[in-house]
Amino acid sequence: MSTVKKTKGTGKKPVKAPKAAVAATLKADSATSNGNAADNLHIDSNGQTPGVRRRDFIHIATVSFAGVGADAVAMPLVSQMSASADVLALASIEVDVAAIQPGQSIKTSWRKQPVFIRNLTPAEIEEANKVDVGGLRDPQTLADRTKPGKENWLITLGVCTHLGCVPLGAAAGEVKGEYGGYFCPCHGSHYDTAARIRKGPAPTNLVVPEFAFISDTVVKIG
């Protein structure tokens, strides 16, 4: 059945569908839709049959708005996921270690985290190397945690692996714990001269970040 479209502002009266034709259509729709003819053909009080039902229009409008909304949300989300300029700037740092004497440590910062740089003495290196690695909670040798030819330079994050506290031992006069490395007084984690966990609740050694020597005295972290 063709639909008669209403005209507006022309002064012409809308053409009404013949009642007999409407009745026949209702009967056919009832047979094909299990009696739900009212859902398939809407007739107003004048016996007219609009081409698009109000419910169909709402559905189409909702889907269209959802499509536009998804694009509008996607752009800010992608923008937020991008690294900010200050984070990119701190992706790596270069530190001149020429002034750090054997037995001394310094604290620096990388990606808003403290970093310990320690120049180990021959005695501290020997102490670390004679430890039975098999008996450690987190088995690693000193060589695993340093660079070839630079075994005296121990670089770690200054963050206790238990709950994220900053251990003591990097600054002059600070307590270094029972194993001569670092000590976290918050819950009693002791690290040795290779910054390996030896006692206390910390589950792993202090983390060694990615680093490389770009000259004899300058190290790049990150």
Image: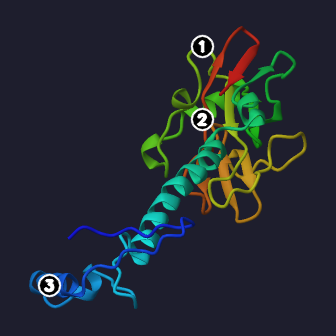
Q: Element type at marker 1?
A: loop
Among the 4 quarters of the image, the one containing residue 20: bottom left
* Rendered position, 157 above or below 57: above
> Mark 1: which amino acid?
Gly
- The disc, 3 or 2, on the residue closer to the chain's N-terminal end is 3
Q: Please provide percent x and percent y for residue 8.
A: 53, 67
Which of 62/141 is in front?
62
* Marker disc for residue 209: none
Give how far apart the Cα atoms at labels 3 and 1 are: 96 Å
Q: Nearer the viewer, mark 3 or mark 1?
A: 3
- The disc, 1 or 2, on the residue closer to the chain's N-terminal end is 2
Residue beneath the point at 75% across and 14% down: 218
Give how far apart the Cα atoms at labels 1 and 2 are: 16 Å
Q: Nearer the viewer, mark 1 or mark 2?
A: 1
Give how far apart the Cα atoms at labels 3 and 2 are: 97 Å
**Residue hosting label 2:** 128
**Residue hosting label 1:** 149
Q: How is the image coloured?
A: rainbow
> Mark 2: which amino acid?
Ala
Q: Is residue 139 left or right of residue 37?
A: right
Q: Please provide percent x and percent y for residue 10.
A: 54, 65
Which of 91/28 is in front?
28
* Rendered position, 19 above or below 185: below
Q: Please provide percent x and percent y for residue 100.
A: 84, 23
**Residue hosting label 3:** 24
Q: Is residue 62 left or right of residue 184?
A: left
Q: Residues within 10 Å of mark 3 (few under 14, many from 20)?
A: few
* Rendered position, 18 above or below 71: below
> Mark 3: which amino acid?
Ala
